[in-house]
Amino acid sequence: MPDAVKAPFPPSDRANHAIFGTMLADNAAWLDDIQHAYGRMAHGGMAFFQEMTRFWELRMHEDREACAELLACRTPQELQECGQRFALKASQDYAEGISRLLQVSIGALEDTPKGKGDGTQGDGAAAVAPRQVA
């Protein structure tokens, strides 16, 4: 059986090892880039949805409080004043909420996730400071 003595793989030469090694190194770098990009997308998406949830929770609470105030109004003038306060507060909250969502979205596009200011990587939402709209 002369075929049984043959080596299953051809003898290796240094040229093939160099080409194969370069290809594997390039592939590993490419996979690292993909992992980094997906990690940024995951952190950014989580930060965005956390901020969105925080905003919804705030507005639901504010809307519930406004409904209770509107029900307590006894005169048309009280109703108008209460409605104006509600509209002003809602517009300020929406402006602030959109600003925070934009900050979180921009933070997700940066090269590294936003940290907590102490050198650690956070979820991105903790690093965004609330902004007051004048």
Image (cartoon, rainbow, N blue to C red):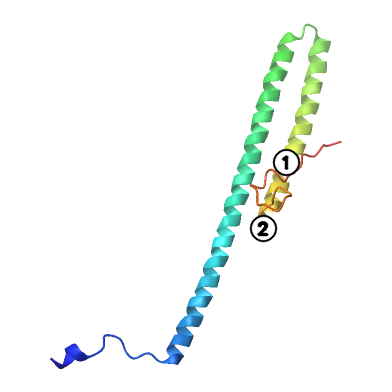
Label 2 secondary element: loop
Q: Is residue 60 left or right of residue 92?
A: left
Label 1 secondary element: helix
Quadrant assignment for the N terminus: bottom left
Q: Is residue 87 above or below residue 121?
A: above
Q: Nearer the viewer, residue 12 or 79?
A: 12
Residue furthest top in the image? 74
Residue sitting at x 65%, y 48%: 122
Residue furthest left in the image? 1
Q: Is residue 134 left or right of residue 9?
A: right
Q: Nearer the viewer, residue 25 or 80?
A: 25
The residue that label 1 is drawn on is 98
**Mark 2 vs mark 1, CA separation in Å:** 22 Å
Given contact means CB atoms under 8 Å apart, are the residues at marks 2 and 1 in contact?
A: no
Task: Answer with the quarter of the image where residue 59 lies.
Answer: top right
Q: Is residue 33 left or right of residue 81?
A: left
Q: Position of residue 92 (x, y in %)?
A: 79, 33
The residue that label 2 is drawn on is 112
